[in-house]
């Protein structure tokens, strides 16, 4: 079965097999070794040096991860551009409202369009899709 809704994800046979292994206690050295390995490999994906960056593993739902990202990465003087395309994008806007993050909300239905922000220059943008629970956030050029 392939799930196309936000929420539980479809697991590959390899991941399902890994879940059949004995539990790993978070206080044991094997867990620390595994976590260190994952963090190092994540930095490697982006070509980042451990002396300059740290990968942080965050447990929770996709929404929890996005909320952590939004509430900690938008500069105090920054503004967020939220491109909404359904329920998930609306959730991103709500998170910004709850954390009192200044934001510009643009609703669209997946159609290409121009966005006129006037003199506003959001420092970051986030895009949410109602089809799959992915989000990307990036600094805005010239902000």
Image (cartoon, grey):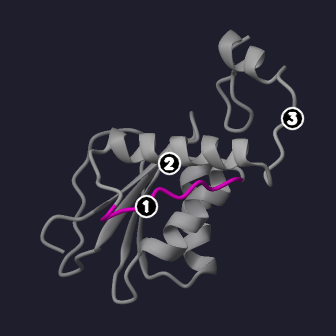
* Residue 16 image-quadrant placement: top right
- The prevailing secondary structure element of the residues shown in magenta is loop
Can residue 79 be spotted in the picture?
Answer: yes
The residue drawn where x is 60% and y is 65% is 67
Q: Magenta stretch containing residue 34, yes or no?
A: no
Q: CA distance from mark 2 to mark 1?
A: 7 Å
Secondary structure beneath label 3: loop
User: Residue 140 at x, y = what percent?
Assistant: 23, 65
Q: Nearer the viewer, residue 92 or 74?
A: 74
Q: Magenta stretch containing residue 53, yes or no?
A: yes
User: Residue 41 at x, y = what percent?
Assistant: 43, 40
Question: Is disc 2 in contact with disc 1, using a CB cutoff of under 8 Å?
Answer: yes
Q: Which residue is mark 1?
A: 54
Furthest toward the bottom, the residue is: 77
Label 1 crowd bin: few (<14), some (14–19), many (20+), radius 10 Å: few
Q: Earlier in the sequence, mark 2 or mark 1?
A: 2
Q: Is residue 86 left or right of residue 55?
A: right
- Quadrant that contains the N terminus: top right
The tally of labels here is: 3
Q: Which residue is mark 2?
A: 39
Q: Earlier in the sequence, mark 3 or mark 2?
A: 3
Secondary structure beneath label 2: helix
Q: CA distance from mark 1 to mark 3?
A: 26 Å
Q: Is residue 10 left or right of residue 21?
A: left
Q: Which residues are magenta?
A: 51-59
* Residue 6 image-quadrant placement: top right
Secondary structure beneath label 1: loop
- Residue 75 sits above or below residue 58 on the image: below
Q: Earlier in the sequence, mark 1 or mark 3?
A: 3
Label 3 crowd bin: few (<14), some (14–19), many (20+), radius 10 Å: few
Q: Which mark is residue 23?
A: 3
User: Residue 104 at x, y = what percent?
Assistant: 39, 72
């Amino acid at each position: 079965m392939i799930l196309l809704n936000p929420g539980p994800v479809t697991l590959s046979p390899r991941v399902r097999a890994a879940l059949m292994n004995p539990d790993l206690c978070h206080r044991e050295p094997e867990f620390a070794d595994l976590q260190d390995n994952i963090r190092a490999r994540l930095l490697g994906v982006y070509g980042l040096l451990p002396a300059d960056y740290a990968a942080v593993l965050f447990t929770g739902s996709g929404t929890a991860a996005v909320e952590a990202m939004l509430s900690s990465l938008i500069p105090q003087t920054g503004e967020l551009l939220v491109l909404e395309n359904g329920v998930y994008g609306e959730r991103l806007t709500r998170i910004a409202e709850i954390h009192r993050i200044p934001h510009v909300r643009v609703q669209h239905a997946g159609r290409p369009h121009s966005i006129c922000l006037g003199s506003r220059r959001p420092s970051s943008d986030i895009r949410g899709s109602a089809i799959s629970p992915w989000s990307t956030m990036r600094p805005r050029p010239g902000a």
